[in-house]
Image: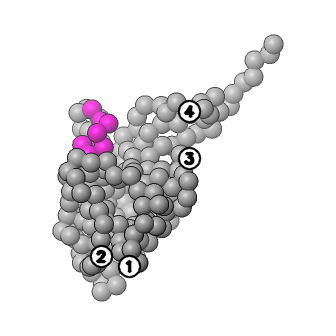
Amino acid sequence: MLAVLPMAGATGCGTSTANDDVSANDKGSQQLVTAETIAGLKAGEQFVVDLRKEGVAYTFDFSKAPIDFSRIAMVNADGKRLLMSEWLSAAKANGDDLLAKPDQKFRLASAASSLGTLTESERAQLEATGKLTKRPVISAQATEYYCYIVIEIYQFCALAEDGTLVCLTVIIESEECIEIEVEEEEP
Protein backbone atom coordinates (compact mmCIF):
# COMPACT_ATOMS: atom_id res chain seq x y z
CA MET A 1 0.00 0.00 0.00
CA LEU A 2 1.38 3.38 -0.98
CA ALA A 3 -0.01 6.79 -0.16
CA VAL A 4 1.06 10.10 -1.68
CA LEU A 5 0.14 13.14 0.35
CA PRO A 6 1.04 16.77 -0.39
CA MET A 7 2.29 18.21 2.89
CA ALA A 8 4.86 20.48 4.45
CA GLY A 9 7.54 19.34 6.90
CA ALA A 10 7.81 15.54 7.32
CA THR A 11 10.55 12.98 7.94
CA GLY A 12 11.14 9.48 6.59
CA CYS A 13 11.02 6.03 8.23
CA GLY A 14 11.30 2.33 7.25
CA THR A 15 13.66 -0.31 5.81
CA SER A 16 14.93 -1.65 2.49
CA THR A 17 18.28 -2.57 0.92
CA ALA A 18 20.07 -2.67 -2.42
CA ASN A 19 23.68 -3.41 -3.37
CA ASP A 20 24.56 -1.95 -6.77
CA ASP A 21 23.84 1.77 -7.14
CA VAL A 22 24.67 4.79 -9.24
CA SER A 23 23.79 8.25 -7.94
CA ALA A 24 24.58 11.93 -8.27
CA ASN A 25 28.04 12.61 -6.84
CA ASP A 26 28.32 16.33 -6.22
CA LYS A 27 26.74 18.46 -3.53
CA GLY A 28 24.93 21.31 -5.29
CA SER A 29 24.45 19.47 -8.56
CA GLN A 30 21.69 19.24 -11.12
CA GLN A 31 21.34 15.61 -12.20
CA LEU A 32 19.62 14.85 -15.53
CA VAL A 33 18.05 11.39 -15.72
CA THR A 34 16.89 10.08 -19.10
CA ALA A 35 16.11 6.67 -20.61
CA GLU A 36 19.72 6.64 -21.81
CA THR A 37 20.98 7.15 -18.23
CA ILE A 38 19.06 4.09 -17.03
CA ALA A 39 19.88 1.98 -20.11
CA GLY A 40 23.58 2.61 -19.39
CA LEU A 41 23.38 0.84 -16.01
CA LYS A 42 24.79 -2.65 -15.60
CA ALA A 43 22.39 -5.58 -15.16
CA GLY A 44 20.94 -5.50 -11.63
CA GLU A 45 22.26 -1.98 -10.98
CA GLN A 46 19.93 0.80 -9.80
CA PHE A 47 20.14 4.56 -10.21
CA VAL A 48 19.77 6.06 -6.73
CA VAL A 49 17.93 9.28 -5.93
CA ASP A 50 19.52 9.97 -2.56
CA LEU A 51 17.34 12.45 -0.69
CA ARG A 52 20.02 12.72 2.02
CA LYS A 53 22.28 14.68 -0.34
CA GLU A 54 21.90 18.41 0.12
CA GLY A 55 21.75 20.65 -2.92
CA VAL A 56 20.97 17.93 -5.47
CA ALA A 57 18.02 18.26 -7.84
CA TYR A 58 17.10 15.47 -10.25
CA THR A 59 15.42 16.26 -13.58
CA PHE A 60 13.60 13.29 -15.07
CA ASP A 61 13.26 13.89 -18.81
CA PHE A 62 11.25 11.27 -20.69
CA SER A 63 10.49 13.44 -23.74
CA LYS A 64 12.63 11.33 -26.11
CA ALA A 65 12.02 7.85 -24.61
CA PRO A 66 10.32 6.34 -21.57
CA ILE A 67 12.42 5.94 -18.42
CA ASP A 68 12.39 2.58 -16.62
CA PHE A 69 11.48 3.93 -13.16
CA SER A 70 11.62 0.40 -11.70
CA ARG A 71 15.43 0.72 -11.90
CA ILE A 72 15.44 3.88 -9.79
CA ALA A 73 15.60 3.64 -5.98
CA MET A 74 14.71 6.61 -3.82
CA VAL A 75 16.53 6.83 -0.46
CA ASN A 76 15.02 8.72 2.49
CA ALA A 77 16.79 10.61 5.31
CA ASP A 78 17.13 7.35 7.28
CA GLY A 79 18.75 5.52 4.34
CA LYS A 80 15.66 3.42 3.55
CA ARG A 81 14.79 2.68 -0.09
CA LEU A 82 11.67 2.62 -2.22
CA LEU A 83 11.35 2.08 -5.98
CA MET A 84 10.37 5.22 -7.87
CA SER A 85 7.97 3.20 -10.06
CA GLU A 86 5.90 2.37 -6.95
CA TRP A 87 5.69 6.01 -5.96
CA LEU A 88 4.74 7.17 -9.46
CA SER A 89 1.91 4.60 -9.58
CA ALA A 90 0.57 5.80 -6.24
CA ALA A 91 0.88 9.45 -7.29
CA LYS A 92 -1.17 8.67 -10.40
CA ALA A 93 -3.79 6.83 -8.33
CA ASN A 94 -4.03 9.93 -6.13
CA GLY A 95 -4.59 12.24 -9.11
CA ASP A 96 -1.07 13.49 -9.84
CA ASP A 97 0.26 11.74 -12.93
CA LEU A 98 3.80 13.08 -13.24
CA LEU A 99 4.29 11.06 -16.43
CA ALA A 100 1.46 12.99 -18.13
CA LYS A 101 3.15 16.40 -17.84
CA PRO A 102 2.97 18.38 -21.10
CA ASP A 103 6.74 18.88 -21.34
CA GLN A 104 7.40 15.22 -20.36
CA LYS A 105 9.71 16.04 -17.49
CA PHE A 106 9.72 16.96 -13.82
CA ARG A 107 12.31 17.93 -11.21
CA LEU A 108 12.66 16.37 -7.78
CA ALA A 109 14.71 17.45 -4.74
CA SER A 110 14.76 16.97 -0.98
CA ALA A 111 14.84 20.73 -0.28
CA ALA A 112 13.43 23.78 -2.04
CA SER A 113 16.87 25.42 -2.02
CA SER A 114 18.16 22.58 -4.21
CA LEU A 115 15.93 23.71 -7.08
CA GLY A 116 17.92 26.95 -7.29
CA THR A 117 15.03 28.88 -8.86
CA LEU A 118 13.13 30.12 -5.81
CA THR A 119 13.33 33.44 -4.02
CA GLU A 120 13.32 33.52 -0.22
CA SER A 121 9.65 34.57 -0.19
CA GLU A 122 8.74 31.74 -2.59
CA ARG A 123 10.58 29.23 -0.36
CA ALA A 124 8.74 30.57 2.68
CA GLN A 125 5.38 30.25 0.90
CA LEU A 126 6.19 26.69 -0.20
CA GLU A 127 7.21 25.67 3.31
CA ALA A 128 4.12 27.31 4.85
CA THR A 129 1.52 25.95 2.41
CA GLY A 130 3.16 22.92 0.78
CA LYS A 131 2.47 24.32 -2.71
CA LEU A 132 3.67 27.18 -4.89
CA THR A 133 2.47 28.24 -8.32
CA LYS A 134 4.79 30.60 -10.16
CA ARG A 135 5.53 32.43 -13.37
CA PRO A 136 3.93 31.53 -16.68
CA VAL A 137 5.98 29.40 -19.04
CA ILE A 138 6.29 30.92 -22.48
CA SER A 139 6.05 28.29 -25.19
CA ALA A 140 5.27 27.95 -28.88
CA GLN A 141 1.74 26.99 -27.82
CA ALA A 142 1.24 30.16 -25.76
CA THR A 143 -1.73 31.21 -27.87
CA GLU A 144 -3.64 27.99 -27.08
CA TYR A 145 -2.32 27.07 -23.62
CA TYR A 146 -1.48 28.93 -20.44
CA CYS A 147 1.41 27.09 -18.75
CA TYR A 148 2.90 27.70 -15.32
CA ILE A 149 5.29 26.06 -12.87
CA VAL A 150 3.89 24.17 -9.87
CA ILE A 151 6.15 23.25 -6.96
CA GLU A 152 4.77 20.96 -4.24
CA ILE A 153 6.04 19.20 -1.14
CA TYR A 154 5.03 15.54 -1.05
CA GLN A 155 5.37 12.90 1.61
CA PHE A 156 4.77 9.37 0.42
CA CYS A 157 4.88 6.07 2.29
CA ALA A 158 4.80 2.42 1.27
CA LEU A 159 4.84 -0.89 3.05
CA ALA A 160 8.01 -2.73 2.12
CA GLU A 161 7.87 -6.47 1.39
CA ASP A 162 8.87 -7.15 5.01
CA GLY A 163 5.92 -5.05 6.24
CA THR A 164 8.01 -2.05 7.32
CA LEU A 165 6.70 1.40 6.44
CA VAL A 166 9.05 3.47 4.24
CA CYS A 167 8.34 7.22 4.01
CA LEU A 168 9.97 9.84 1.79
CA THR A 169 9.54 13.61 1.58
CA VAL A 170 10.32 15.31 -1.74
CA ILE A 171 9.74 18.55 -3.57
CA ILE A 172 8.41 18.21 -7.12
CA GLU A 173 8.63 20.97 -9.73
CA SER A 174 6.62 20.50 -12.92
CA GLU A 175 4.83 22.38 -15.65
CA GLU A 176 1.04 22.52 -15.72
CA CYS A 177 -0.98 23.81 -18.69
CA ILE A 178 -4.59 24.71 -19.21
CA GLU A 179 -6.19 25.13 -22.61
CA ILE A 180 -7.53 28.59 -23.34
CA GLU A 181 -9.90 29.76 -26.00
CA VAL A 182 -8.32 31.97 -28.60
CA GLU A 183 -10.48 34.32 -30.56
CA GLU A 184 -9.34 34.72 -34.13
CA GLU A 185 -9.09 38.26 -35.41
CA GLU A 186 -11.05 39.09 -38.53
CA PRO A 187 -9.01 40.63 -41.37
* First of labels 2, 4 by sequence position: 2
User: Could you give the CA–CA distance between mark 3 and mark 2, rounded to whole angstroms?
Assistant: 33 Å
Bin the neighbour count of mark 1 within 10 Å (Cα to Cα): few under 14, some 14-19, many 20 and up.
few
Magenta region, residue range: 111-119
Residue 89: which disc?
none
Name the residue at the right extreme.
Answer: 187
| Badge 4 element | loop
User: Could you give the CA–CA distance between mark 2 and mark 1, rounded to whole angstroms?
Assistant: 7 Å
Q: Residue at x 32, y 36 (%)?
A: 117
Q: Residue at x 42, y 61 (%)?
A: 37
Q: Is residue 21 above or below residue 30?
A: below
Q: Nearer the viewer, residue 128 or 62?
A: 62
Say if the magenta span includes residue 184.
no
Residue 20: which disc?
2
Q: Which residue is mark 1?
A: 44
Residue 25 can be seen, yes or no: yes
Q: Residue at x 39, y 52 (%)?
A: 32
Residue 139: which disc?
4
Q: Amino acid at mark 2?
A: Asp
* Badge nearest the viewer, 3 or 2: 2
Q: Position of residue 53 (x, y in %)?
A: 21, 57
* Badge nearest the viewer, 2 or 4: 2
* First of labels 4, 3 by sequence position: 3
Q: Residue at x 30, y 43 (%)?
A: 115
Q: Position of residue 143 (x, y in %)?
A: 64, 28
Q: Which residue is mark 3?
A: 102
Locate the N terminus and report the quarter of the image it occupies: bottom left
Q: Is residue 113 above or below residue 169?
A: above
| Badge 3 element | loop
User: Could you give the CA–CA distance between mark 2 and mark 4, rounded to whole angstroms?
Assistant: 40 Å
Whether the residues at callouts 2 and 1 have beta carbons within 8 Å, the answer is: yes
Q: Amino acid at mark 4?
A: Ser
